[in-house]
Amino acid sequence: MPTLKIDNREINVPAGTKVIEAAERLGIMIPRFCFHPALGSVGACRVCAVAFTEGPVKGIQMSCMIDAQDGMVVSTTDAEAVDFRRHVIEFLMLNHPHDCPVCDEGGHCLLQDLTVAGGHGLRRYRGLKRTHINQDLGPLVQHEMNRCIQCYRCSRYYQEFTGYRDLGVMGIGSRVYFGRSAPGMLESPFAGNLIDICPTGVYTDKPSRYIGRRWDYQRQPSLCIHCSLGCNLTASARYRQVVRHEARPNLEVNGHFICDRGRYGYAYASIADRPRQAMAAGTPGPIVDILAGAREAIQQTVEKHGPGSVAVVVSPRSSLETLAVVKEACGQHGWTGPAAAHTNRQALNRNTAVSCLRPELAVSLAADTEAHDVLVIGADPLNEAPMLALSLRQVQRRGGHVIVIDPRGVQLPFDFDHWAVHPSAMGAILQALIQEIGGHRATAPDTPATFDITKLARRLNASPRPVVVCGTDILTPHEIALAGDLARALRRTHKVAGLFYTLAGANAFAAALLHDQPVSTEAVLDRIEDGGVRLLVAVEQDLWREFPDRKRLQAALKRLDHLVVLDYVDSPLNREAGHFIPTQPLYESGGHWINQEGRLQAASPVMAGGEPIEITGGSDHPPRVFDRRIPGDEPLAAWRAVAALAGEDEADPAPQLKTALADFHPAVNLSTPEATGQRIDLEAIAHDLVESGPAPEPAEDDAPADAVVLLLVDWTFGTEPLSAMAPALTRMEAAPVARLHPDEIARLGLAEGRPVTVSLNGNRLTVPVQADPRMAAGVMAVPRHHLLEWQVFGETRVIVKRSQLKAESE
Amino acid sequence: MLPEKLKSELTAQIARVDHPREMAIDVINALQDHYGYFSDEALAQAADLLGMSPLELDELATFYTFIYREPVGKHVIHVCDSLICWMEGDENLVAHLCDRLGIQMGGTTADGLFTLLPVCCIGYCDRAPAILVDRQVHGPLTIDALDRLIDTLRENHS
């Protein structure tokens, strides 16, 4: 722990800390362009020069390149150092176009700040400036190379940190050019971070161009709800429209970056067809009246058919506040539910994962990067939780090793081992692996010899820090529990072994705490079909888009006496509703979310609700009509609406929320502000949630040998319902295809590029076939794409017999 | 299109090394010799052969003076653009060359015979001012010697 003196102040830092970081700990911000905490030091820009007056190093040196050592005396204000930095900045500014007034970075630009702070106020260079031709880098990132100061942050981030190879540095000397070999869409789904890390305006946010300056925006700390990782971001709004997301550093979760799905997925909150008007049977009315009408309908149903005839479904994406009030309402009134998962398997999967996540095993997304060996089971990181792929890349960069056991053609931006195993074989492999780890020889399951379980067990046993990552989308509860057992088995022989689940939904962890016995929408539909449930309340749960059997859903809705929908997205479901109540997305309501590792995090409200001026003014000046109200300000935070449905007329819902949050679950404690940002008390979660539920048999066991397993899966872009509404992301989406191993295509008599029709119980799904040699045999993967009517089979994992597949000629 | 013979030769060479990217410069040079310059087509083919991305190859190709990403004349005249040659009157030579050929630095004559490029530095300071034509060093040069060289190169083609 070296002790050194910077500007006459002493500081003690861990060995290996650079002087620039040591100064930062003292609150001294030494100028920097090339240095970035996530990328490390290269000493390229020369602007962090300081004077070393005493100790092992002497003279003007780059503070990002020198490790802090005992006895160092550093001056950042030394006249020579200040002069040095001033000249460096002047030199870097030679070719800069001085276009700050029209530059989107202007006003929050590191180059601007340091030019002013560095004392370069007068331009002396009178020569010609070198100029560049910019490239079209796709719909997300705007390129303006003339502003470049050659710090190399972008190419280092893009190639080294994210592992993509289509953006880099070309040329030499004054001709250095950062970009692609030819104009075109950036391939990395993490490309948006270029905007955040570029110290000037070479890469700027394209969708928010011409909307405003950063100081015009309402900016608040927020969270990403487009997967379960809970990455931190800063959301910006202007004129009642969410216009931009930036990564918000959280070194325990997402580090410094976010993925492009999270960065550009916000459009749903301000989209023109967002429902803002409360409706009773399609007729708009004041929200108070509609709420009263819905409350009356509930009361009547309860009087006629008992409290259990009212059921509630809620989204695992809803805030903790909403989940808590829904839970309280169901508990108090004896309503059925709340259901916060679509199928029984999905509900059990989620609860199994949450119950297996013991406090001593849980690791954060950031801690994943410190693993030596990561075993990924039944997860496709890039498609299901993109930032996980970026974390795993850092494992590989640090010399660690990643093994993925998954039937899909998993792709990751680094070298890893892939065991493409049939879903039905996963359990046996995990069991054998657990036995081997425990020192028992396991009888090898029926898998190819290349999947050497003994060797893998030995590798994991020898690893100083193994982590098990497990998905919950395509697996069964049995395998998810086995993944937990595997981590526990490793824990016996290791001081540190981690377990990391990904879940379905940003608040799925909290949804798992709703009940000891999980309830699914499927189970609620059963009750509707047998007449037990007569009224359904759907809280921010767009069953139309997300429930995997649309026909069954429609039939069930017809059987209902009444449907109440609370939501902030437009959906045919809303038009079916007897009462529709518009709710607020997180930018308006704020709230708390619990991510997949059990971390409780808060999002602040960014703006008051209302129709964006862009819409009310028809892209022109807003209407010159004076009113006390903002147009479209009716939506309520979902928890308020639910409290109004469940509580007394006109009652203030705030105390109700407080009680509901206090009663939510012993593991979740919101009473102290310090609890936010920390992991909840995992010890307080019952670790036997699973046993109490019915354990479904893996259906594949008695499937005919020539059957294939159809998996309806997540893709980075196009499948997550909210981000799929973002116009900026539509160009990033690939068209939906059914991926199969080439041998499988031949075996099934299908043809690549030609559509295949899957017919099951009278339902059909037609999608073009694509060969993917990385897929396991006997598996077909189709995305839950918004351009595909995939909601036909009632599950996202189904057995399809060969006779149920038909190759289409066109 | 790349002739099969050249393609198989390159594939064999690449197969002999541990990491295909070790051969990147050799492949680029081979393709440049074939096409006359390292064209976009050649870039794509090299990327294919080496399993690298086009950008990675472009990063290399644009770094080196002797890899041409644009079409060049029959003879590329690389004029040393460094200190010692400057001291020995290189500026006059360049002015004369531009005048004589009717092109600017970086340009190619209309007949497609000559391309003029600066290079830093060819390491023939003892023969400054020096130029490099068709991998041959010429220097120390006078304006007369330069004229004779251009005439000879022209005569060879007429």
Image (cartoon, helix red, strand yellow):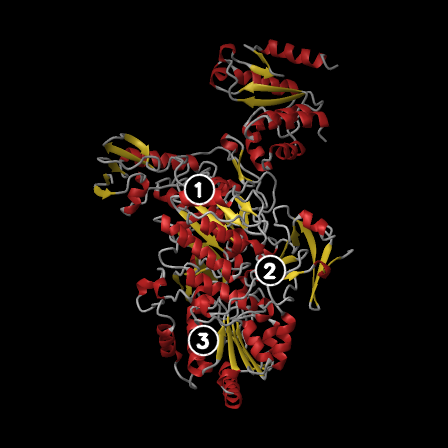
**Residue in front for this viewpoint, A619 or B3:** B3
Question: Would you say A609 lies left or right of B45 here?
Answer: left
Q: Residue at x 76, y 57 (%)?
A: A808
Camera-side mark, 3 or 1? 1
Q: CA distance from mark 2 to mark 1?
A: 36 Å
**Residue in front for this viewpoint, A443 or A326:** A443
Q: CA distance from mark 3 to mark 1?
A: 44 Å
Per the image, label 1 sits on a secondary structure element best described as: loop
Camera-side mark, 3 or 2? 2
Which residue is the site of mark 2? A701
**Residue in front for this viewpoint, A541 or A782:** A782
The mark that comes first in sequence, 2 or 1, is 1
Pointer 3 indicates a residue of which chain? A
Pointer 1 indicates a residue of which chain? A
Q: Amino acid at mark 2?
A: Asp
**Residue in front for this viewpoint, B75 or B30:** B30
Q: Amino acid at mark 1?
A: Gly
Pointer 2 indicates a residue of which chain? A
Per the image, label 2 sits on a secondary structure element best described as: helix
Q: Position of residue A436 (x, y in %)?
A: 45, 48
Question: Would you say A64 lies left or right of A430 here?
Answer: left
Q: Is residue A9 visible?
A: yes
Crowding at mark 3 (Cα within 10 Å: few <14, some 14-19, many 20+): many
Numbered mark located on residue A400 in the image: 1
Do the dots labelled 3 and 1 sit on one chain?
Answer: yes
Q: Position of residue A639 (x, y in %)?
A: 44, 74
Q: Quadrant of residue A82?
A: top left
Numbered mark located on residue A326 in the image: 3
Crowding at mark 1 (Cα within 10 Å: few <14, some 14-19, many 20+): many
